[in-house]
Amino acid sequence: MAGRIPQSFINDLLARVDIVDVIDERVPLKKAGKDYQARCPFHDEKTPSFSVSPDKQFYYCFGCQASGTALTFLLEHDRLDFVEAVELLARSVGIHQPNSAVTVPDEPPVVITASVLLAAVTKLHSIANLGTNCCRSHRKLPWIIGGCVCGGVGGIVLK
Ligand SMILES: [Zn+2]
């Protein structure tokens, strides 16, 4: 269900997120100079060797060499998958993820009979990556939104 998330979106997201907030919610951090420290969540230790830099938006453990960004931290610590971690960060700063998933409308399809709409609908299909591989025989007309009249949706012909 997940699609590709543009690197530019991730960069933008990481620029808005504060790694200190993200990690502090999970591992209480203590200010130490201009960085923050904690006992490393990735290995067992008695003295803190886990350091978070708000300047670099990066964490690093001198004990086990764990390192990364806020996103890496969620992947490693919360064991989220990549898309979940991106969604969680995006929600935390109130931005919406771009079309990472293609959804098929739940509502009954609207029948389009006017040929003037064909171009628009064909475009819709190609944008949504639907219908490009299905119903080759029905490519001309008539289309319905979200699939073909024969019931084909997104490359799968529904029986
Ligand atoms: Zn460590």
Image (cartoon, rainbow, N blue to C red):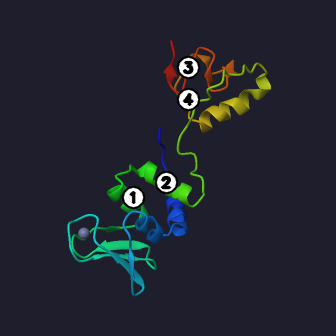
Badge 3 element: strand
Point out residue 23 in the picture as x, y percentages from the top left corner: 41, 66
Q: Amino acid at mark 3?
A: Gly
**Label 1 – label 3 distance at C-alpha:** 38 Å
Q: Amino acid at mark 2?
A: Leu
Point out residue 10 in the picture as x, y percentages from the top left corner: 50, 60
Instruction: Say few, some or many: other residues with alpha carbon within 10 Å of mark 2 (under 14 / 14 to 19 / 20 or more).
Output: some
Q: Nearer the viewer, residue 59 or 7?
A: 59
The residue at which mark 2 appears reads as 88
| Residue farthest along the bottom direction in this orientation | 33
The residue at which mark 1 appears reads as 74
Q: Give me the residue at 53% from left, 61% from top.
A: 8
| Residue farthest along the top direction in this orientation | 159
Q: Nearer the viewer, mark 4 or mark 3?
A: 3
The residue at which mark 3 appears reads as 152
Give the mark, 1 or 4, whose residue is nearer the N terminus. Answer: 1
**Label 2 – label 4 distance at C-alpha:** 32 Å
Badge 1 element: helix
Instruction: Say few, some or many: other residues with alpha carbon within 10 Å of mark 3 (under 14 / 14 to 19 / 20 or more).
Output: many
Question: Which corner quadrant of the image does residue 50 belong to?
Answer: bottom left
Badge 2 element: helix
Point out residue 98 in the picture as x, y percentages from the top left corner: 58, 50
**Label 2 – label 3 distance at C-alpha:** 34 Å
**CB within 8 Å, label 2 to label 1:** yes
Q: Is mark 4 within 8 Å of ligand 1?
A: no
